[in-house]
Amino acid sequence: MILMKTGKAEENKRKKREALMHTAFELFSHEGIAHTSISDIAEKAGVGKGTFYFYFKDKYDLRNHIIAAKSGEIFIRAKNALDQTDLVLLEDKIIFLADNIISQLENDVITLRFVYKNLSWGVFESAFIEHRDTNIDFALVFESAIRESEIKYENPLIMIYMIIELISSTCHDSILYGKPLPINEMKGYVFQSIRAIMRAQQVSPEKI
């Protein structure tokens, strides 16, 4: 009986937290974070203001959790698709992930606008490493792929950072405004640049 009550309590907590995140995402996306108050979020989510502070420090902390969750969902779908391929080279795997993620964002412009507008490298690290809003260890995924790669890279963290910034900055305007090129044309240049970044970071065999 105690276990059943504990399980029900945890489920209620999960539902309240998800309600806050879902509501905040809608309000942030349509009204903007600056014009959305914690009271607005709590009221629309159907919880007390005190409940909000039980889960989140402030609305910016909540924003970071949403970024982690949304980015995590996108990445998990891309990784699951990658797992169905027989790609071997890390370079080809990164290109596949980038292509899949871009395609997802093409079909979800609201998430694209929200994540692009609010995502910084600091938030990226905090969301993926500290918040754990997803069921996947992103750092471990990249570290494992890099470790298993026959080709070694001088500074993998900087390399991944540059690739993320490249995709984020170029694909946002391309998807939303078709500038400087429509995304279907722009992707070729993006993938070419990703390969150039990765090859510039390769460590020559004699240095391994």
Image (cartoon, rainbow, N blue to C red):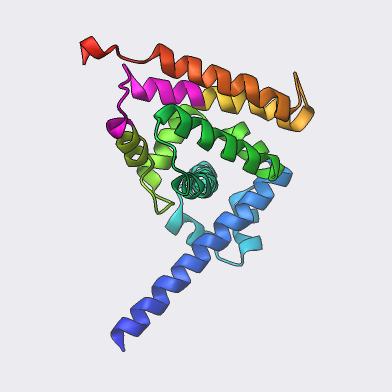
Kindly give the residue lying farthest to the front in the view shown.
86
Task: Determine if residue 34 is in view.
Answer: no
Residue depicted at 47% across the width and 30% down the height: 92
Nearest to the observer: residue 9 or residue 113: 113
Q: Position of residue 193 (x, y in %)?
A: 55, 17
Indicate whether 170 appears above or below 106.
Answer: above
Q: Main secondary structure of the magenta part?
A: helix
Nearest to the observer: residue 87 or residue 189: 87
Residue 178: image quadrant is top right
Q: Quadrant of the C terminus?
A: top left
Q: Position of residue 106 (x, y in %)?
A: 69, 39
Indicate whether 186 appears above or below 73.
Answer: above
Task: Determine if residue 53 is in view.
Answer: yes
Q: Position of residue 146 (x, y in %)?
A: 32, 31
Q: Which residues are magenta?
A: 146-163
Q: Position of residue 108 (x, y in %)?
A: 68, 45
Indicate whether 167 appears above or below 61.
Answer: above
Residue depicted at 53% across the width and 24% down the height: 165
Residue depicted at 49% across the width and 24% down the height: 163
Is residue 62 left or right of 178 when viewed as pictured? left
Kindly give the residue lying farthest to the right in the view shown.
177
Q: Is residue 147 magenta?
A: yes
